[in-house]
Amino acid sequence: MSDTVSRRAALRLLAGAATVAAAATGDFTASARPRTDAPGSRRTEALLGRLTLDEKIGLLHGSEDPHGLGQAGYLPGVPRLGIPPLRLADGPAGVRVTAHATALPAPVMLAATFDPALAREYGEVIGREGRALGQDVLLSPMVNLIRTPYAGRNFETFSEDPLLSADLVAEEIHGIQSQGLIATVKHFALNNQEKDRLTLDARIAEQPLRELELRGFEAAVAAGVGAVMGAYNKVNGAFACENKPILTDVLRTDWGFEGWVMTDWFATHGLAALAAGLDMEMPAGVHFADTLKAAVLDGSVPEALVDRAVRRILSVMERFGLLDGSAPARPARDARRGARTALTVARAGATLLHNRHATLPLAGADARHIAVIGPTAVIPFVSGGGSAHVVPDRARRPLDALRDRAGDGARVCHTLGEDLYGKPLPGTSPGADFEGQHVDPGATWTYDGTLTVTEDDEWTFCIHYSGDRPKVVLDGTELFPPAPGLGELFGGGLVGTAPDGLAVRRATLTLAAGAHRLVITAKGREAGQLFRLRRVTGATRAADVAAAVRAARAASSVVLFAYEDATEGADRTHLALPGHQNELIEAVAAVNSRTTVVLNTSSCTTMPWLGRVGAVLQMYYPGQEGADATAAVLFGECDPGGRLTQTFPVSEDRHPMAGDPRRYPGVDGTEEYSEGLRPGYRWYDAEGVSPLFPFGHGLSYTTFAYRDLSVRPDGDGLAVAFTVRNTGHRAGVTVAQVYLGPSPDLGLDQVRRALAGYRRLELEPGHDRRVTVRVGARSLSSWDPERHAWVLGTGRREVSVGVSAGETLLVG
C-alpha cells in the first residue's frame, strides 16, 4: 500500500527547480506589488484635498457612537463631504451587538471540519448579518496560531498548523467581504496568549516568524482583507502597533497590503506608531487626536503621514462602495440560513476522540434509558467569553434534544453532578433574602449578621448580581475584590453568567465550624439591582455526585457533559477540567462503563479517566445549534466529521511549553519562541513524545482503506493521488492528510514532516474515490533568513498520507 516517488519523477522535480523557486519567491517581492504610498483614486484624492486637518485626524481615531448598537467601535465620518461613519463589531463566531445574531460554533470548531468551503459559508453568514445589523467593519477573523494549550483565546482561532490556518482564514475573509462587510484579520502578530499580553515581548527568529505565524496573515492579505488589527504585545523588542519591520517592511512592502492598520483597543503607545505604519487608533484618540494635531502644527510629524493613513482608510471605504453610495442596500437578517449554517458546522466539526466497544452511536437498549449528567446538559454552552460573546436567537438545552432523539417511551433523566451556581445559603441571621435581594434605585442596602457553619468544610461562595457587584466581607476579608488587570472587563461565557443573566463571581475558602460574621453592602445606583448569595460546599458536592452515581448505575448508558470556560483577558492555569469534574467522571464511569463524555471546552484538556469511559466527543463551543448537533452525532444521525487542529497532551508536563517558563508564560517580560519551527505536532515528532491525541485525529462510525499512492510534479508543486474506500456499513467522513518531509538540498532548518495538504471526504458504504491533493510551492519552500526570501526545497522528499499526524497509511 505504498508507492515511492520514482527517480525519473525526482529528476523532473530537480529540472523544474528554477521555475518553482521563482514561483515560490516572485509573488512576494516588492517589485511585484504596487507602492503602498501611491496616490489613490481620483475620488479618494479629491476628498483628501478637501479635508481639513481636523477632519483628517477625526478619521484616524475612534469615538463614541451617538447612536450606538452595542458594537465595539465607531469612527465618525465627515458628513459635509459624504464620508459616512464606520461601525466596528466584534465577531469571531457571530456579530457581537446588543441585537440578536446567529451564534455560530467557535472558530476552532469550524477549523475541525478541515473544510475551506464551509469556512467561506461561515464568513458569508457573518458578513450578511453584520451589514443587516448596521455594521461596516468586522473585527475578525483571528489567525494567530495555537501555540500554547493554556492560551485563553484558542477557541477564537483555528489551528497549531500554519497551512490549515491560512486556508481557512482566506476563505472566511472571502465569505465575509462578499457580503460587503470589511473584514479585519488579527492580531498582527504573535498574540498567542492572554497572560501579560499588554506588555510581553515575544522574541522569535526570522525563519519561524515567516513560516509559521505570518503565513495566515499573508494569506489574509492575498485574499484582499480590508483591515489588519495590530497586537498588544511587542515583537522582537517593539510594540506590534508601532513595529515598522512588520507593519511596513513585511505587511506593506513585501505583501503589498493596501488596506488600513488599526490598533487593538487602547494598544497605541505614541505618535511613532504613525510613521511605523499604523493608521487608526481605537477606540478613542488618546494619541491620534489633539496630540497628533499639535505635532503636525509644530512640524514634528509631517502632514503627509496623516494623509497616507487617511488615504488608506478612504481607499478601502471606496472599494466597498461606501463613498459613492454604490454599496448594496443593507439586507434583512436571514436567521434561518444562519441557523442552518450553525448546525452544519457543529455537526461537521464534532470530533470523536475515543470510542471503546462501540459505545457510540447510541442504539438499541442503550438509547432507551440514558442518564444525562452535568450542568451544561441544561444550560446551553453557546460561546466563549469576552469579545466572542453573541446574543443568539435561541439555544436549546442538550437534554431536550436528547429526549427528542430518544423518542417516546425512552427514559432520559438528568442529574446535576457539578454545581456551577450554588445552593441557597443556610444558617444566616434574619433580615436578608439571599435568594433574591432587591436594592432600589439610589438606595444602599446593608447586612451585618452571622453565618453559622455546622462542620469544617471547603466553601465556594457565588455572588449573582445585576448592577454593581455587592461588597461581601466574611470575618473581615472581602470575598469578591475587583479583579486585577482586565479581569473586570471579560467574564466567561458560561460560569460568569447565571441562566437568568445575572453576572456571577466566585470565591473559595475553607471555613471552620462555628459562627462567622457576614457583612454585605449593595448599592442600587440609578437602575437598582437584584443579587443572590449562594454556596457550594464539600457536603453539597458529595450529594450531587452521589445522585449522579445513582442515576448512572440505574441507566443503560450515560451522557456526561463536561465544560471548561475560556475568555479573552485570561489564560487557563491548568489543562485539567475545572472544579471537581474529573472526580465526577471517575465516579460515574466506575458504575457504568458505557459513559460518553461530551466536552464543551475551548482547547485541549487532560483526561486521567480516559481508559474508564466508553467514548469522548469533543464539541468545543458549538453555537446556538449545539444541542441538536450533539444529539445528532450521539445517536448516529450523522458521522462525527471533525478532526483535531491541535495536539492534545497526555499531561501538564508533556507538551511544547512544559518546563520552560521562557517559552511560556515568559520571564521578566520576555518570551522566547525557542521551539522555532516546531510548535504543536512538530514538537512531538522532534522530541519523540506521544500525545494523548495527535493533530488531525478523529474517529468515524465507519472504516476506510487508503491505497495506490502516486506523486508527480504539477506545475510549481506536486500532485499527490490516492484512492480511499469506505469499507464499513454506513456513510462516513474521513480527512486525508498529506505530510511532507524535509528537502535534502536545503541547508536550512526543517522539520521531520509538515502538513502539506488535506481533503475532507464523505463516502457512502462500499464506495471509493480517487483523490488528488495538490502540494503548493509554498509548502515545498523554506524561508532563508540570510536571503530574506523563500527558497525551494528540491531533491528526494518523503510524501506520506495518513489520517492524523500520528497515523500514517501510505508513504512515498
Image (cartoon, rainbow, N blue to C red):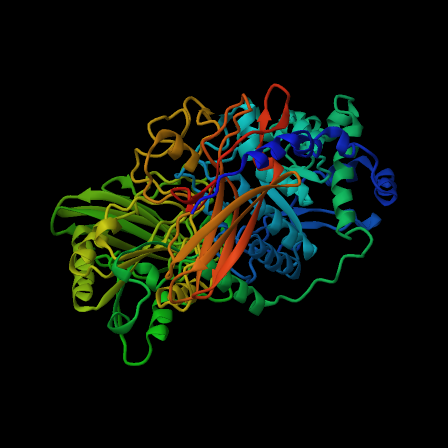
Name the spot of residue 456 as percent of width and height, x first.
13, 46
Q: Name the foreground residue: 544 vs 554.
A: 554
Picture coordinates of residue 3, whole percent (x, y): 48, 43
Q: Position of residue 236 (x, y in %)?
A: 54, 23
Locate residue 227: give its quadrant. top right
Which residue occupies the foreground of this view, 564 or 762?
Answer: 762
Nearer the observer, 763 or 643: 763
Q: Is residue 512 left or right of residue 533?
A: left
Left or right: 370, with 441 as reference point: left
273 horizontally vs 328: left or right: left
Q: Looking at the image, is 209 positioned above or below residue 514?
A: above
Q: Is residue 427 visible?
A: no
287 up-or-down from 414: above or below: above
Seen in the image, is 327 located left or right of residue 722?
right
Residue at x-position 64% and y-position 48%: 183
Residue visible at 62% across and 27% down in the picture:
791
Q: Position of residue 721 (x, y in %)?
A: 54, 48
Q: Quadrant of residue 310?
A: top right
- Indicate whether 493 appears above or below 730: above
Residue reaching furthest top?
786
Q: Is residue 11 visible?
A: yes
Q: Is residue 621 above or below residue 775?
A: below
Number of callouts: 0
